[in-house]
Amino acid sequence: MRVRYEMISPCHGIIVSVQSSKFSYIYEGESVCLIKTESDVVEITADCSGWIETLHVKPGEVVAPGRVLATLAENVSSLRSGSD
């Protein structure tokens, strides 16, 4: 069984780059993408470890708060064993 997590955009902006790729494994705190806002570039990092199941954005796309950026998945057995 898998547990899924959605990474949500916290701000308005334009996706500058996507540092991860579909099916890659990322660890908590690892950068997934950069969003350019009116005043800054915001680094979006993973709140948990897992496989990137789906990337919902690509460079150049405009995003708003609440937009799903990526979906992560982790096996429940990995969560129980504390593989991180």
Image (spheres, grey):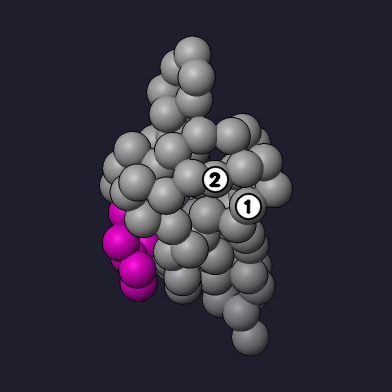
Is label 1 in a helix, a strand or a loop?
Answer: loop
How packed mark 1 is, by other alpha carbons closer than 10 Å (few <14, some 14-19, many 20 or more), is some
The Cα atoms of the two marked residues, 1 and 2, are separated by 6 Å
Which residue is label 1 attached to? Answer: 67
User: Front-most of 23 and 62?
Assistant: 62
Q: Residue furthest top?
A: 39
Count of residue discs: 2
Task: Give me the residue at 35% from left, 68% from top.
Answer: 22
Residue 24: horizontal and vertical position, in percent? 32, 65
Q: Is residue 20 left or right of residue 68?
A: left
Residue 42: horizontal and vertical position, in percent? 47, 27
- Residue 31 visible in the displayed image: no
Task: Give me the residue at 43% from left, 64% from top.
Answer: 55
Which residue is label 2 attached to? Answer: 63
Is residue 21 inside the magenta stretch? yes
Q: Is residue 53 left or right of residue 16?
A: right
Indicate which disc residue 4 carries.
none
Residue type at mark 1 is Arg
Residue 49: horizontal and vertical position, in percent? 50, 55
Task: Give me the residue at 49% from left, 13% from top.
Answer: 39
Above or below 64: residue 3: below
- Residue 61 visible in the displayed image: yes
User: Front-most of 10 and 26?
Assistant: 10
User: Front-most of 23 and 40?
Assistant: 40
Residue type at mark 2 is Val
Is residue 30 inside the magenta stretch? no
Is label 2 in a helix, a strand or a loop?
Answer: strand
Task: Give me the residue at 36% from left, 55% from top.
Answer: 58
Question: Which region shows up in magenta?
Answer: 20-26
Above or below 33: residue 57: below
Q: Residue furthest right?
A: 66
How packed mark 2 is, by other alpha carbons closer than 10 Å (few <14, some 14-19, many 20 or more), is many
